[in-house]
Image (cartoon, coloured by chain):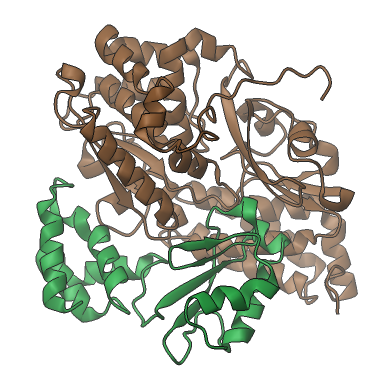
Chain colours: A brown, B green
Amino acid sequence: MAGRVKMEKLLLRNVDKENSHTIDVYLKNGGYQSLRKALKEMSPEDVVEEVKLSGLRGRGGAGFPTGLKWEFAAADVKEPKFFVCNADEGEPCTFKDRVIFEKDPHALIEGMLIGAYATGCRYGYIYLRGEYPIGRKILERAIGEAYEKGFLGENILGTDFSFDLYVHSGAGAYICGEETALIESLEGKRGEPRIKPPFPVNAGYLWKPTVVNNVETLANIPLIIERGGKWYSGIGSPDCPGPKLYPVSGKVKRPGVYELPMGTPLSEIIYEHAGGIVQDRKLKAVFPGGASSSVLTADEIDVPMDFPSLAKAGTMLGSGAIMVLDETDCIVRAALRLIEFFRHESCGKCTPCREGTDWLVRLVRRIEEGEGSEEDLDVILSVSETMENSFCGLGMAAHNPVASSVRKFREEFLTHIELGRCPYRRG
Amino acid sequence: MTLTEFREEVRKLKESNKYPELKSYLLPALWMAEKNFPAITHDVMRVVSEELSVPLVEVEEVARFYAMFHTEKKGKFVIRVCTNLSCMLRGGEEVLSELCRLLNVKPGETTPDGLFTVEEYECMGLCDGAPAVTVNEDRYTNVRLEELPEILRKYGWKG
């Protein structure tokens, strides 16, 4: 690590403090000063401009410019408007947002308040995945504290700005991380995506203007208001700047969430921050952006972890969840497990996704169990191509781990077919 | 909880004014049912349907859509074992088979004494502690096979 400048902790600045989840600790460390600054010294337009200047792009996976989203929502005149935090962190092997709302929930609440002020939203919901009951308790307690101190409710800090905030628990459905499915679920329906446009900023919850931002995105907002968009835009990759939380799991020595400048090379994250591969084995493959990203081989990991660089490398940043496989892991088995997940989570609304995920499971399982044929590989790629026509992003991306594994590890698939068994399975 | 008590609770929920329209209370109401009944039965759904003015069929389709809602009878403790990729790479499947062996059930089944339901589950966001298991709202990370009996005994397992 010689010569490398260590980045100041920004998003994780509070998480190691004792009782970091309480408002007292948050206030003692300068908490809610950005809200005060926004409400007292800035107009809503100023806030939107500052966020645009920062270059912040959404951290949920799609990477849409946050300032632009806010500008669209602010421009819509329909009332009331809603501000929703997407805390349905469901992408397999993603656990970065959990760190924020369990350890620093007030940073999220402050980010939402500033966003609601900038866009003119009166009510807010944190759509929290059902699998995070501990997070729910922490968030509800934090919201209660914020009401007590006058940061939530009517006439916040003596201004005309009022905002009420609630937690809404999901109940175990990955698809609800897709923003329109999330809105359907908030409305008390099955989580099935809506056609876009109209986009939620114009027609979201109850068809009213609704801003939907990811947890990590919102945790950046107090920093941007405190230190300025220009300062923020100088961190990391120029075209998608800022600090980024990278959750690393699988066969690394130190799994965990690492905060690094956007664009930190994947190899550095794995070998320096996460400590390298368990038992110093050889790295075999990496899914660099969650379960729906295309796999990278050991030769491809010198890539900056940001939106454009990974897109250029034929994969995607997604949630930034890095899943590492070593030389003893079977890529067919890994691809099978991921496509089984997508089959389970497909909402069933559209045919390419509902049928495509099912066929991919059958085909890959057949190969893993030694019953496959070489033709199956072509069928996999053809089914994958058809799935590109799915209704929403789930189906459009679900085939990525399978199709990319077939393309990059074709030999390993062929070995399964020729041997009639999985070469990695003992016994 | 009796159905009458449940109806009262749903009414209280409506009075919270958390949402601007009734149907949005559906997931919170079903969560209340999930936590207070062994199963979200048609009788429970009917109460929700009446109180929220949502057709029964729409209550049922929502109750069946979400993985955490049980429309069939579940055990007092629901054990969820993650076998998604990061947990799989670190032994999640072995944890699942060992749990099933100890409790003599298959994934998805409930023990005859009604104490445990074992579920093979998708990612619960505990991947830095893979393999991960949750028992109701408690979480266990970096789970080793040999500590499973001890975990089960905390919840009244007599094995």
**Residue nearer the viewer, B133 or B55:** B133
Side of A99 relative to A128 (left or right): right
Q: A325 above or below B45?
A: above
Query: Horizontal and vertical percent for residue A265?
Result: 74, 29
Single out the residue that lies furthest toward the bottom: B112
Query: Horizontal and vertical percent for residue A391?
Result: 45, 50
Side of A238 relative to A102 (left or right): right
Q: Is residue A347 visible?
A: yes
Which image quarter: residue A268?
Answer: top right
Quarter of the image where the N terminus of chain A is located: top right
What residue is drawn where x is 28% and y is 37%? A145
Q: B50 above or below A109?
A: below
What residue is drawn where x is 18% and y is 72%? B56
Which image quarter: residue B137?
Answer: bottom left
**Residue nearer the viewer, A114 or A178:** A114
Which image quarter: residue B55?
Answer: bottom left
Q: A127 above or below A35?
A: below
**Residue nearer the viewer, B118 or A17:** A17
Please state the total of marks drawn on the protein image.
0
Quarter of the image where the C terminus of chain A is located: bottom right
Q: Is residue A82 visible?
A: no
Side of B44 relative to A332 (left or right): left
Query: Horizontal and vertical percent for residue A117?
Result: 26, 22
Query: Horizontal and vertical percent for residue A287?
Result: 69, 46
What residue is drawn where x is 79% and y is 34%? A272
What residue is drawn where x is 11% and y is 76%? B4
